[in-house]
Amino acid sequence: MSCPQSADEVCRHIQANNTYYVDLEYMLASGVTVSSATLASTDSTMTLSAATVLASDTSVPWKLDNGEVVYKTIKANQGISFTINAGAVGKATITVVATLSNSDIDAVGCTVLTGGEAA
């Protein structure tokens, strides 16, 4: 499966169980942090772990549009991590709903392309 990835689209194999990160800093006003987050998928067969707010600065691999992989630091309390496993082959949308320290609620979506064959 050929799958170019971008900031709002990830590719995964149906048998993979990987950790993913979402940097929410761009949507946060100065001094505002993420208090909690929930996840939902349009694929009812996809299993998502609970979203975990990153308690400390976390360095994660980041793939640039040219394919180069660099490391980006997500600041403490400004991003989340979660895992995906199972699911159906095809396209799904994951929605992250974040409750912020100022009581606002914001959301962001990501397209997940799942390929391969189940065991």
Image (spheres, rainbow, N blue to C red):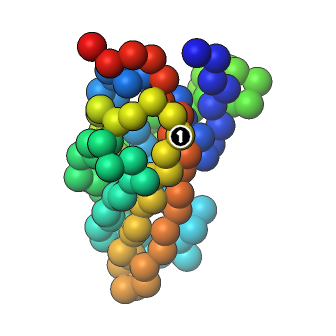
Q: Residues within 10 Å of mark 1 (few under 14, many from 20)?
A: some
Instruction: Name the kind of residue labelled 1 in the image.
Output: Lys
* Residue 65 picture location, percent across and down: 74, 31
- Residue 16 visible to an observer of this rendering: yes
15 to 61, vertically: above or below: above
Residue at the disc numbered 1? 91
| Corner quadrant of residue 63 | top right
- Residue 76 visible to an observer of this rendering: no
Instruction: State left or right for residue 36 relative to residue 68.
Output: left
Q: Residue at x 39, y 53 (%)?
A: 41
| Corner quadrant of residue 5 | top right
43 to 16, vertically: above or below: below
Q: Check disc 1 and report its element: helix, strand or loop.
A: strand
* Residue 57 picture location, percent across and down: 38, 46
Instruction: State left or right for residue 6 relative to residue 34.
Output: right
Q: Residue at x 42, y 43 (%)?
A: 21
Give the total number of marks visible in the rendering.
Answer: 1
Q: Nearer the viewer, residue 89 or 57?
A: 89
Q: Nearer the viewer, residue 101 or 87?
A: 87
Q: Nearer the viewer, residue 50 or 2?
A: 2
Residue at the outermost bottom position: 103
**Image quarter hosting the C terminus:** top left
Q: Residue at x 57, y 68 (%)?
A: 27
Q: Residue at x 29, y 32 (%)?
A: 86
* Residue 98 picture location, percent across and down: 39, 69
Residue at the outermost left position: 50
**Image quarter hosting the N terminus:** top right
